[in-house]
Image (cartoon, coloured by chain):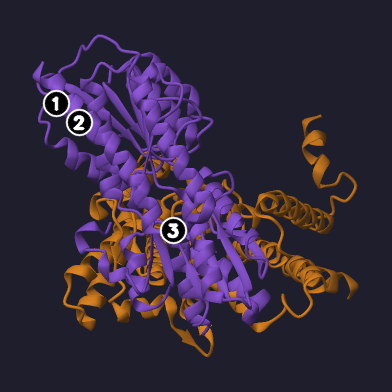
Amino acid sequence: MNNQKTKKLYEFRKVAILIAICLVFTILLPGVFLTWSNIRSILYSVSLTGIMICGATFAVLIGGIDRTVSGNAAVAGACCCSLLLSGDGSMGSTVLAILAGLGCGILSGLFHGLVLSRFDIPAFLMTLATNQVLYGIVQYITQNKLINVMNAKAFNTIGSARILGIPVPVYILLICFLVSYVVLNHTVYGRNLYSVGGNREASKLSGINCRKVICIAYMISGFMGALSGLILSSMNQQASATQATGYENDVLAAIVVGGISLRGGSGTLQGAMFGAFLIGIISNGLRLLGIDAIYHDLVKGVIIIAAIAFDMYSSYSMSGMKKRGPFRRKASSAE
Amino acid sequence: MRAKRLMAALLAALCVMGLTACSGAANADNASGDEAASADGEVQEAVGEVVEGMIATKEVTVNPYTDELKIGFIPSNATEANGTAWGEGIREELSYWPNITYNIFDGEMNADKQSQLVYDLISQDYDGIILQAYNSSILAAAVEDAEAAGIPVVTINLGADTAYAGHVAMTDYEAGYAIGNKISEALGEEGGNVVVIQATPGATRGEELESGFQASMAEHPEITILDEQTGEWNMEKANTVMQDFLTSYGDEIDAVFCHNDQMAEGAGVACQNLGYNDIIIWGANGESKALEYIEQGIITGTVYTNCYDQGATAARLLMMYLGSNIDTSTFTQTPVIKMPPITVDSSNVANIPQEDRW
């Protein structure tokens, strides 16, 4: 009975870490941190990276990586905003512009999927290079100027409207998370994805169409990247040549902090979202505490290391490797 | 001979323009106060140094009317609105000289990268360099080496910590000071509370704006700075920071000062979304979207600089040196031309014509 309880607690260890950090901030910031408006603010700030994470997780789980999430977001935003400017402002032209933006992301994902599933190119290098290409395309579309879409009211509603007091991007994140969760955990494609990520050769031998699985994974990642780019453009009422720059690092950091193996095949979407919320909550707490920005990275880094250490320790404790412990495992195996 | 006479006339015109720009800066914004005025005094002195610098001459090896010349522009970020506007201003000016090849090299918000680009241009025998330094101290050595190699360097907006051909400044200190005064004017004698959304830590432009703003705040003890956080020059990050400020301080906030327009726009959108419509929000730069936001009442004001004109001025100054016998490597002080900082709010935003909006 006790073992079962411990196992349940273990399953929720990541949530426990988040709750513990929230408790610390609540004590330090009474009546400020744990308020509805602040929770809303955290959700809003995490929504963009969260949507990107939902897509990028697919690419990482198959043993790849997608550094083009930011490039896809920038291309989608630029493409959509330039079409909005040239359109007549009707609902039809707005929908068309949004679909074109999303299409850019899917096409980009398809290209990556086709290349990476057929050629033995490291995904990191490939997507690092194509991200540059995507930003080059964005510079060409925008001519390095702001594309201002302040007058596209219907489009701007996506980023600024609220339903029951909650910003629309938070709902979009929730939908993306639920759909991704179901696809990863309750569909044949999800099982195949983990299988291909864990052992591509064995999956091939067992009849899984690995190329198809990889292609779809990158297309989902491209779609989510483009979706977040559209939301970003809508929030900012503009597209720029530098839009979403650096987001790929935040996304990868959250995925790694969330415990997804960069070798593929193991990890959960919930884990990746934990990483996003961990970083989001710490950033929010530090700002509310009024701590000078020059200390943010330092404090954030220390808290993240502590959280990962706790996560690893509890994980190894549960796996019955208490004696050696998580931090000495490599040294022991090396002997 | 004719070219030399033309260059001499251009030099004289530039000196006059420099002085006019300085006085223009003072006239454009009376709110700049004593410190701004003393800064103008320094500028006049610096322009005077140009004339003294002419004593050191060199042999004229280039005819800017006929020789094939190469000029490079290295902005700190070529993909941002003001970098693009400077680039276009320079291109427009240099288009009158068909013998000139003009290239833009992106510094990617990295001073080391910019330094490397300067050395690349030296090794490629460029004839002149226009630079917007990302960090004034890091770029000093590269600028010195370019000058020593006989390549005049003109900087835009942010210069290097050494003496070189010339600097066309955007007056960040004065802009921060003017914004501080505008906020205190709006808050009146009762004063109030201000929050600041800062640039990325270490960016010299942000530091200059901040010093000017702090100097103004020191003269207005009735105003309290509640909090300062970085928005990393970025609209959506500033939006999040502003939401956090509103969570922490709510109705206590009377005004916001942002180190650029993008962050002011982010703060404006956050205030609108959360129903705080009375907060005074000031940015700095004067990009076209900020001017539209002022027209719509989303933000209160900005300090506008005509970046097209600033780029063109830098190009003119560089062309003057290229055709003259002035040895810029012997300068002991950098001549400075200050672009007039124009504080823009709802009362005068309509005066900025569409063709000057960038």
Residue wearing tag 1: B6
Residue wearing tag 3: B284
Residue wearing tag 2: B10
In this rendering, position of residue A318 left or right of residue B152: right
What is the quadrant of the N terminus of chain A in the image? bottom right
**Which residue is depicted at the point 43% across and 60% down?**
B30
Q: Marks 3 and 1, how far apart in space?
A: 37 Å
Element assignment for label 3: loop
Q: Residues within 10 Å of mark 2 (few under 14, many from 20)?
A: some
Q: Marks 3 and 2, how far apart in space?
A: 32 Å
**Which residue is depicted at the point 32% across and 28% down?**
B129
Q: Marks 2 and 1, how far apart in space?
A: 6 Å
Q: Is any atom of residue A198 visible in this view?
A: no
Please state which of residues B130 and A283 is positioned toward the viewer in this rendering: B130
In this rendering, position of residue B80 left or right of residue A178: left
On what subunit does the disc labeled 2 rest?
B
Callout 2 amino acid = Leu
On what subunit does the disc labeled 1 rest?
B
User: Chain A's colour?
Assistant: orange
Find out whether the residues at labels 2 and 1 contact each other: C-beta distance under 8 Å: yes
Front disc: 3 or 1: 1
Q: Is any atom of residue B24 visible in this view?
A: yes
What is the quadrant of the C terminus of chain A in the image? top right
Front disc: 3 or 2: 2
**Which residue is depicted at the point 19% across and 16% down?**
B62
Q: Is residue A60 above or below residue A230?
A: above
